[in-house]
Image (spheres, coloured by chain):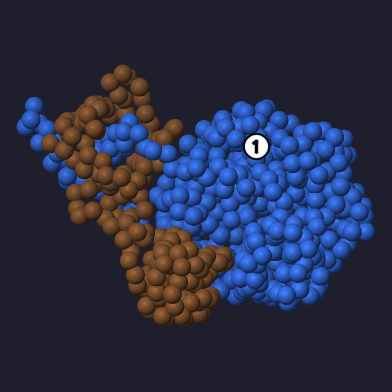
Chain colours: A blue, B brown
Amino acid sequence: MRKISKLLICNRGEIALRIAGSAKEMGIKTVGIYSSADIGLPHTYSMDEMIYLGEGSLQETYLNADLIVHKAFELGVDAIHPGYGFLSENSAFASLVREKNMIFLGPSPKVIDIMGDKKASKETLFAIATPLIPGYFGDKQDSKTLLEEAKKIGFPVLIKATAGGGGKGMRVVESENEFVSSLESAMREAKKSFGIDTVMLEKYILSPRHIEVQVLSDQHGNHRHLFERECSIQRRHQKIVEETPSTALDPELRKKICDTAVAIASHVKYEGAGTVEFILDTSGAFYFLEMNTRLQVEHPITEMLTGVDLVKWQIKIGEGKIISFSQDDLVPRGHAIEVRIYAEDPDNEFLPTNGVIERVGTTHLNGVRLDTGYADGSSVGVEFDPMLAKLIAHSDTRRSAITKLLLALDEITFSGLKTNRDHLKRILNSLKFKEGETYTDFIDKNGDSLGVPEVSNDSFALGIAALQLSGKNLVSETGASHICRDSLVLEESLNMFRNV
Amino acid sequence: MEKKFIINDTKVVACDYGHKGNMISFSIEGKQFTFYEVDKSSEFIVLKDESGKHFKVGISAGREKDESHICAPGIEDLFISSDSKSSRKKSSVGGGSLQSPMPGKIVKVMVSEGDEVKKSQPLLILEAMKMEHSIKSPRDGKVVKIFFSEGDQVQGKVELLSLSGDDTDA
């Protein structure tokens, strides 16, 4: 047992702030990191102490393990929380932290290595008869062998980078003649993103659902699950809507899938918070996909459903504490849904956008949580992932959670730049979503009904009236915004007087 | 008199336009609208229509100069600007374009100058936001000039390559 009194949060944006919140609640001193690209963002001024990583590439800043560990050691940090992304699943970083006698809030470097490698994890889990998708996980990486294997599996086939994540280095190949060019592209992207271009092949399952199970394990061999999350609604293989419970699981299937996740955590001697991801097909069969050995972006829905603060438990487990609740103590309450608000244009191939956030917006609805790393006036650049915020609603039923989230989306406007907010509303409002017909191809299949609706003249009129009656013309220049009187409007009202 | 606006890339003409004090009235395609200002802050304005229905409308600066971003419950966001100046030319970006959709790096050039290409054939691959975006040919044609090589950094909305051939249906 070792008390954590000072925690370094090795991340940026909303997750850095979210982790700091729990640490502060526990009376722990927080240390943050930031690079020159983030100066002025809330995470750079919301911790007790800050480490400035200077300017430069990600490798020189947020991914600079040596520099971060060195500075943390100098500041007398007890533990490091890696958040998600960046160094969170980097075993060399976890080792470095441990070598300096600091606590890494996550599993052992060995477990990170096994579970972080999609191939090694499958080989390990084969031993406990975990259901796996048919595929090729071999060492031979020449295009001829891979094509032969792809043919054996049968098209459509999914090419995945073994070190992958977030859809990078991933390609769906519909037919044999597209295979080689997709393979090259996937390998190139994998090399860029992860430094390793090894790929594996999998049978591509049609109309699948993405179901994942939150697990929590202490250092004393206690393993719990905190139920599932369904994250089927994705674009570019990245999740945008997540909910719990899943509409696709009955109590029996839920127990089976959650127990499988616990068996995996137990088998690999997992420690901390982790997520076991599965693909569920239409027949109710599920297959192990991968395990994320870190806190997940969409963890808040689990927290709202169970009332368990996952970050606090990561810290307690790091201190060596025993999980104080039994599996039966955990009772899911109601329904929670999260949407991810992105700076992107869903009506133009989801390409990222940038600009200045004029106004984030506020919501005071009961049971709504907004996790964001931005504030009014923040600039959104192209250096980082374009996620602006996570908006989460919790209610007693799925139906009322949807309604609540739609109300919250009306209030959290992120105005000033193009976001996917309207697109998220279209999804939540769609009949298919309301009926729980959620598959990973939801966005592609329902593209027509999720497109830009024709704007009514009533809406145009409201916009014109609001703009003109506001008596101001808002001008945005070079990243800053100014409010000035519009002389045109004044002129118009003078003309009007003459007409009367 | 009339006033012209560009709203979400659509030209909207407000006819019989009148604005006096807290009241505004105009018609769009023959439908008459009248609104009254009820309250106003730096962030929003509350309007009332003739039937007494109230609307709380958020107004902020938009994506570019002279544009405003309007957010109101139950409607899609509006990006609105006055059409008094010469209409802004909207550059077409995306999969069918030969422009870079955003700043990034050219990771692969798949054709050479002089090549005949088919519609939808991938021409080059741009890496941006850590993702690969394939730039496909919008039509059948011949590659006249490629302005960048593999490894080059490019800005957003710049011409990446020129294609010959009939571009009327592009």
Instruction: Tell me the quarter of the picture where residue A173 sits.
Output: bottom right
The residue under label 1 is which amino acid type?
Answer: Glu
Q: Which chain carries label 1?
A: A
Asked which secondary structure carries label 1, the reply is loop
Quadrant of the frame with the C terminus of chain A: top left
Name the residue: 17% across, 45% down: A488
In the image, residue A263 lies at what x, y percent? 89, 50
Q: Where is residue A337 in the image (x, y as percent from the top left)?
A: 64, 38
Q: Residues within 10 Å of mark 1 (few under 14, many from 20)?
A: some
Evaluate whether residue A425 shows in this view.
yes
Identify the residue at the far left of this view.
A498
Q: Position of residue A329 (x, y in %)?
A: 85, 35
Q: Residue at x 24, y 32 (%)?
A: B29
Identify which residue, A86 or A200, lies in the foreground: A200
Relative to residue A90, is residue B79 drawn left or right? left
Query: Residue placed farthest to the top in the image?
Result: B51
Residue A258 locus on image (x, y percent): 83, 43
Residue underneath mark 1: A437
